[in-house]
Amino acid sequence: MDAQTIKSLVAIFLAAILTENYVLNKFLGICPFLGVSKKLDTAVGMSCAVTVVMVIATAVTWPLYMFLLVPNGLAYLQTIVFILVIAALVQLLETVLRKYMPPLYNALGIYLPLITTNCAVLGVTMLVLEKGAEDPSFGYLQSLVNSFGSGVGFLVAMVLFAGVRERLENCDIPETFKGLPITLVAASLVAVSFLGFNGVVDGLL
Amino acid sequence: MEKKNTSLWREFTKGIIKENPVLRLVLGCCATLAVTTAASNAIGMGAATTFVLVCSNVVISLLRKVIPDKVRIPAFITIVAGFVTIVQLFIKAFSPSLDKALGVFLPLIVVNCIILGRAEMFASKNKVLPSLLDGLGMGVGFTATLLAMGIIRELLGAGTVFGIPVFSGFMEPIIIFLLPPGGFFVFGMLIALAGKLSKEGKAPESTGCAACPLAASCQKLQQKDNGKEAAN
């Protein structure tokens, strides 16, 4: 692997975390972002589980699409195949973790069933294929790096937001804004801060 | 007979105001936030989701006695994914520009919790006609909310409504309303407003866990949190 490839992989990784953040820029995975970001450790557990599933799901769906669906003219079945593959993968992962890695299962296990219908996971498997269609150099390795970066970006957003929410708990909020509205306004402010990353990655490398 | 008609009417109207899926049950937030940068996209997304919601509600209601309880979620997902594929192909053929505007959020209707939520909460327990009306009502409620958000964001962010200039001349568009932060902000304001106008007079505490098919595992999470608080 030459320096140029490594450089481009680092750029893809950083872009996935900062400028193309799944939660704050692309609006994918909003439900867990709003639902399980109340406590820091639940937020971290959920994001780690999402990252793991994202990478594994991309690792499986990418070859499946390229070598099975496209050659047979079945690309239109993408949605239905991908969601079933993800559902099966999540189930498999849960079983394997429970059997062979109980400590990891205790940490991530309860989050896994929630991930099947997480749009960030299905979204990443489809978006990497879209990117690959636009840019032929965006292959399997790049897709995996992008998925991993997206997962880390999800983690960053969740952790930042969990911090903001813990501070919010002690604030005196107007009655009408208690609960979800103030959470969304806070999310809006966190998203403003992420706007600042636009163009940063291109400038870095 | 009359009583039956009123109850059917109620199944239809509850989704529009009282149990509005987005503002009161807080389901399907991703699509709501992502596609509402223009009013026309909002209508396209709303119509596509309504179609899938009505069809999947009808089919799931028809199959409710056939599908074994243990595998119901994968079965529901497969049915929904089938209808989503139909809508995807249809929109690709007849409105490529809408297909481009909605992008990945079109196939992502499959994981929109409104659809699985209604399947789990309503269609799997009720007869076909109420399920159809429930789906239609929820779909109309979803579309109306998306449209409201789309109009607000397009008006403030681009100074147009459905592409027709409204603000030309006397006000600069506030571009941030088209960007992600504006989406979160407008959504928060609408939820606060809907909460204030509702009977309870307050906004929902969190996302719509109760209607989510995976609520059981989520409740485990909350119990874990609560357990920690008690231990502290």
Image: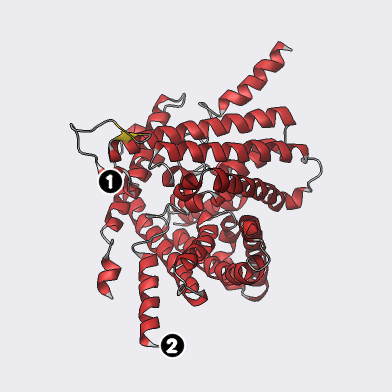
Residue A188: x, y in percent? 32, 48
Q: Identify residue type, mark 1.
A: Ile
Quadrant assignment for the C terminus of chain B: bottom left
**A130 to the left or right of A116:** left
Q: Height in image: B97 above or below B40?
A: below
Residue A203: x, y in percent? 25, 70
Q: Identify residue type, mark 2.
A: Met
Query: Residue sitting at 36 percent across and 86 percent down?
Result: A3
Quarter of the image for residue A171 reads top left
Q: To which residue does mark 2 refer?
A: A1
Q: Residues within 10 Å of mark 2 (few under 14, many from 20)?
A: few
Q: Height in image: A187 above or below B166?
A: below
Give the colour scheme shown.
Answer: secondary structure
Q: What is the total number of numbered labels drawn onto the structure image?
A: 2
Helix or strand or loop: what does disc 2 sit on? loop
Query: Residue sitting at 36 percent across and 44 percent down?
Result: B183
Quarter of the image for residue B33 reads top left
Would residue B126 be visible to someone looking at this image? yes
Depth check: give the residue in front, A98 or B156: B156
Gap in angstroms between the C-alphas marked 1 and 2? 41 Å
Residue A80: x, y in percent? 65, 55
Judging from the image, mark 1 belongs to the subunit labelled: B
Q: Height in image: B72 above or below A44?
A: above
**B3 to the left or right of B172:** right
Q: Height in image: A142 above or below A87?
A: below
Q: Residues within 10 Å of mark 1 (few under 14, many from 20)?
A: some
Q: Which numbered dot is residue B231?
A: none
Q: Residue furthest bottom?
A: A2
